[in-house]
Image: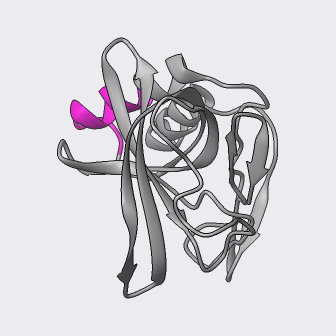
Amino acid sequence: MRRMAGRFACRLAVAVAGSLVTGAFAEAQTVSPVCDNSGFLAAQRTFENGGMRDDVPVHVCGRVIAVSHKARRTRSGWHGYFYMDTGNGVSIRIVSDLDEMNAPDWPWVSKGDQTEVVGRYYYDKPRRQGIDWTHHGTGRSWGMPGYVIVNGTKYQ
């Protein structure tokens, strides 16, 4: 019971409202209705200190600092990548599933653009972390839709 309460408390650090039902199980997943970079940074610190293992829904804002101009094909389709500054000298990789998003040809983001991102923060290790599920779709492993807003234009 204490472990479940701890997980719930960690999710509250980056979450406020919403829910999801996926596959054969139901689990509440929520995200702040406004940018919560401090919640994201707290979750990142918790992961780095070994305190959390489950992916976390996040809502972050910042400026684009780098863009991979060529989309890459992975086992799950075509993806575009960019890095966003979330403050305090921290940048995070944003992964956009181009097959799922209603957006123009990649890249539709440029260095210096202001962005807002809702998605799933994953942490495998310090050099393998990022935010994915930034599109309207859901799946068995993630049931909360996401989006990317670039200079006021929403892509999902």
Out of 25 and 98, give the one closest to the viewer: 98
Above or below residue 138? Residue 122 is: above
Q: Quadrant of the C terminus?
A: bottom right
Secondary structure predominantly adopted by residues drawn in magenta: helix
Q: Residue furthest bottom?
A: 75
Residue drawn at x 45%, y 24% as measured from the top left: 86
Above or below residue 57? Residue 115 is: above
What stretch of residues is rendered in magenta?
Answer: 42-52
User: Image quadrant of residue 43?
Assistant: top left
Residue drawn at x 52%, y 59% as measured from the top left: 107
Colour scheme of the rendered structure: one colour
From the viewer's perspective, tell me whether residue 140 is left or right of residue 67: right
Expressed as whole percent of the image width and height from the top left, the position of residue 21 reads 76, 68
Expressed as whole percent of the image width and height from the top left, the position of residue 14 reads 59, 30
Decide whether residue 51 is among the magenta residues: yes
Q: Is residue 122 visible?
A: no
Q: Is residue 137 visible?
A: yes
Decide whether residue 36 is among the magenta residues: no
Expressed as whole percent of the image width and height from the top left, the position of residue 49 reads 22, 30
User: Image quadrant of residue 145?
Assistant: bottom right
